[in-house]
Image (cartoon, rainbow, N blue to C red):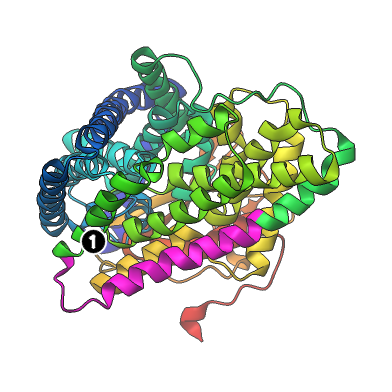
Amino acid sequence: MKMNDVMAKNIKTRLHNKKGRSQIEFIIEGFLIGIVAGLVAIIYRLLLTKAEKLLFFAVDYIHGDVVKIILWMLFLTVLAIIVGKLVKWEPMISGSGIPQVSGEMKGYLSQNPVKVIIAKIIGGTLSIVGGLSLGREGPSIQLGAMAGKKLAQVQKKGKTKEKTYISCGAGAGLAAAFNAPLAGVMFTLEEIHKNFDGRVIVSVMTAAVTADFLAKSVFGLSTVFQYNSSTPIPLTLYGLVIILGIIVGVSGAFYNKCMVKGQKLYAKLKMIKPEYRIIIPFLVAGVFALVYPKVLAGGSVMVDILVKNNFVLSALLTMLIIKFLYSVICFGSGAPGGIFYPLLVLGSFIGASFGIVCISSLGVNDIFMDKFIILAMAGFFAATVRAPITGIILIAEMTGSLEHMISISLVSVVAYVVAYLCKSEPIYSSLLEGILEKQGTKLADPSDETMLITYNVTFDSEVDNKKLNEIEWPHNCLVVAIERGHHEFIPRGYNRIKAGDFITVLINEGEMDYMNEILTEMCCDKKKKYIDNKNT
């Protein structure tokens, strides 16, 4: 049998399996992934909750006792060494985990799910016991993604389906971490999967809702942030909303730059082995435990201060600056833990500081203080992560209110644009670049494995209303199916692509990032001249 015949047969088999799958099957898959990934994320969240309680118990216990303080510092050093050894054993647990998941989806990285899950849970828990300024959300996304990947491996799924399982697990992880299923779905599509395939949405939504149900069964129905957000900001104050968007946009760009710079500064400490550099933030945490414990861990104590409206401007700015610098020290070290929650805490303090100025100097009613806090969190998220839709939905779910949707959207768009004008790269893209540069990771061999990706053709895109043989496709890709309505067919050169079609393309896994960018531009963007860089 000729090689072309073998490939054609394999493609037909894969398309047949793909076509025969009903929506019920996608829902069942999402349900199973949601259970597995959700349980892993819930276990991690429970451990971090206990770890934070243990931390602040220890802070109170050692207060004023020199011997206990010395023993605590020695204990922190031991914790740091253990965490450092875990990072050395499995480097993929370093930091948030979201860049690693993104790298896996793009074909740059291949993580061992069992090692990552074990090391991330232990390392992340010990980091919070030590008081590091790290969050649970990024790690929960990575844990959920790896749980999904392992489930795909157990079920002996192919690479195409494995990517879907990873996406579903990531969404379930975020949903379980924040009690935010819609944000889990949107973050997965906007930041991880980067493709709004209707079939993927069904699976991710099911996984996220399942994980959220399990999380609420354990942690209750209350929202993460307990702010009074019933009264929306009037249109007359939208000028202040725009100003706030500019402030958090610039702040977000500065935050991203400092986070990346922090990692580079740690890398310059050549005299200290990488696994021992983590001792630095642990010892800094020990100092803060004695003099300023409010900034320890993710920032729940700081959030409680804002909820109780127990603050003055000077105290807010002091905590904001210290928390910011401490977060850079902790995250830059490579300790396992995320920046999601600390990022939102910083945003909330920017909003509170802005609110105090507006209330005291401009005569704004103090009932809008909580609104400024909520808006600043959303804007700061949009400026740093550059996923504004996710930020809008996330803050709405975390506060349990949709009353301020228009103002949140406005501040997010302004912050997004300002960060872009500041030439700030999205934080997770920058972190992924750092991982690849540090490890010298290269794309997998294009001949390793192939996978199928589906794109939705939009109106007036480059391929809209063109025959297949009239389109200049990139090298090493093959359009193997077109789905129109409820019908799917294997295309020929004379078939014309129409807006609303779903086209399935066969590509090499190792070229996924490059191909996905080009094909998305061709199928989804407005018409523009496509140049194949591989021919130039």
Q: Which span of residues is magenta-colored? A: 248-274
Please provide percent x and percent y for residue 240.
80, 47
Please provide percent x and percent y for residue 160.
34, 46
Q: Does the magenta portion include 264?
A: yes
Above or below residue 464? Residue 488 is above
**How many numbered dots are placed on residues in this image?**
1
Q: Which residue is mark 1?
A: 280
Q: Secondary structure at mark 1?
A: helix
Above or below residue 11? Residue 223 is above
408 to the left or right of 34 = right
Residue lying at 24% horizontally and 30% vertically, measured from the top left: 57
Q: Is residue 427 visible?
A: yes
Residue lying at 13% horizontally and 41% vertically, measured from the top left: 68
Above or below residue 42? Residue 235 is below
User: Please, what is the three-letter code of the amino acid marked with disc 1?
Assistant: Ile
Which one is in front, 216 or 333?
Answer: 333
Residue 391 sits in quarter:
top right
Q: Is residue 194 visible?
A: no
Please provide percent x and percent y for residue 34.
34, 26
Above or below residue 282? Residue 429 is below
Quadrant location of the N terminus in the rendered image: bottom left
